[in-house]
Every structure is written in structure tokens, then in C-alpha cells.
Image: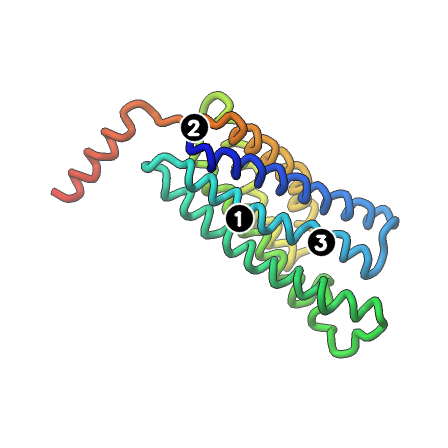
Amino acid sequence: MNPFTSRIGFWSAVIATIFGLGYIVALLLSLAGMLTGAWATAYQLAPSIVLAWSYMVLMACVFDAAPSERKVFATIGLGFALMYSVMNSIVYFTELTVVIPRVLNNDAAGLDVLLFEPGRFLFAVNGLAYGFMSIAALFAAFVFGKSGFEGRVRWAMVAHGIIGPFIVGAVLWAPLTYIGALWIITFPVMGILLAMFFRRGEAIQVTPGSKQIGARKVASARA
């Protein structure tokens, strides 16, 4: 593996995991009633914006580390990660710099549509974005081999990926939130395993003969 990919992949995974845990802690404190109102939203969204940026970088490193015959999965994953990052950057930056300061100053008139609450516009965008985040992990999972340590990375990413439809569906039907909430387990596990993978700096496994098989298929298609 390219040493720059290894280092950047490791640190982006570490940063994404730390700030993901920051969001989880703020969420749990809010659910416990220890954080309330606009401050509860601020403490949840502040780490989440860094999470969005670092996750995009992490998926770029997965793309760079992917063997050529599996590059398509990494490309699709990176595409969904980019959409997630851009959408949530807009949501969180708007909330942190426009909405929350005005709410704290009791000057929220005309901001109803931008409030970060169920049934509001930006809340729906946020749900869709996190669905894209999970889908990115689901596709990128197939970059990794099925056995050994890579197998554990692969299945952690699959586990995180399959909750994506439930996160999006929760925007329309709230009970699905209970399934989507598994994010607080699947994401840290995935992040830690990816950090360990990039720390090792080993090339991704390639199934013996897969390149030759792929080449024969291309040749047959051209013929």
C-alpha cells in the first residue's frame, strides 16, 4: 500500500471514529436530559461536520488502496461518501452558523423551515445523507477480501451499510429509528477496524487467478 494512503487512511479513520463518538456521547446526553434545547443540537452537530469531512477522506483512501479489479466498488462508495459529506456540510454549517445562534438570541422568526427537528427540511436532508453514508460503506466493503482481518473489515462495513435504508426510512416512519440507531454501534466498530487496517499498511488481498479470469472475460466480451 502507498505509505501516504496508509497514513492518511489511518488518521482519517481515527478522526472519523473520535468525532463519531463525540456525536454519540452528545446524543446520549441529550436523550438523558442532560443537554437540552439549541445547545443539545449544537453539541451533536459540531462533531458531526468533522465526521462528514473525515469520512470522505477515509473513503478516498479505500478507493486508492483498492485493487484494480475491485475499483468499481470503491468508486461507487466514494461517490456516495461525497454526496453525504456535501449534504451534511450544508446542513450542519447552516445550523451552526445561522439557525442555532439566532435561536439562542431569541431571534428565530422566519427560520421554522430550517429548524433541525423531525418533519423539517434539513432534518430530512440529514437522514438522506446518513443513508448515503451507509450505502458508501456497503459498496466499499466489497473492496476487501473475505478472509482474515480483511474479512472482519468487510463484514463490519456491510453491517454498517445495511442499516442505510432504515435510516432513510425513519424520516418517513419514526419507528424505524430503533433499527437505524444501530449506527452508534456499527460505525465505531467499522472506524476502528479501518484504522487498524490502514495502520498495518498491507495491500488488499487479491484472489489468486482473479486478474486472469477478469482479463479473459474482457477479452471474450470484446470478441
* Residue identifier under label 2: 145
Residue 94 higher or lower than 184, as above or below: below
Residue 40 shows which numbered tag? none
* Amino acid type, residue under disc 1 in the picture: Met
- Residue 86, x across and y down, in percent: 55, 59
- Measuring 45% from the left and 26% from the top, which residue is drawn there? 202
Residue 22: image x %, image y %? 73, 44
**Residue 173 x, y percent position in the rendering:** 66, 56
What is the three-letter code of the residue carrying label 2? Gly
Residue 46, by quadrant, is bottom right
Where is residue 65? Give x, y as percent.
42, 36
The answer to whether residue 198 is left or right of residue 32 is left
Q: How many marks?
A: 3
Give the Cα distance between marks 1 and 3: 17 Å
Task: Report which residue position mark 1 lands on.
Answer: 56
The Cα–Cα distance between marks 2 and 1, rounded to whole angstroms, is 22 Å
Q: Residue at 61% of width from left, 59% of height from top?
A: 89
Secondary structure beneath label 2: loop
List the residue tagged with mark 3: 46
State yes or no: discs 1 and 3 in contact (Cβ < 8 Å): no
User: Tag 3: residue type?
Assistant: Ala
Name the image quarter holding the C terminus.
top left
Q: Secondary structure at mark 3?
A: helix
Residue sitting at x 52%, y 46%: 57
- Gap in angstroms between the C-alphas marked 3 and 2: 35 Å
Q: Secondary structure at mark 1?
A: helix
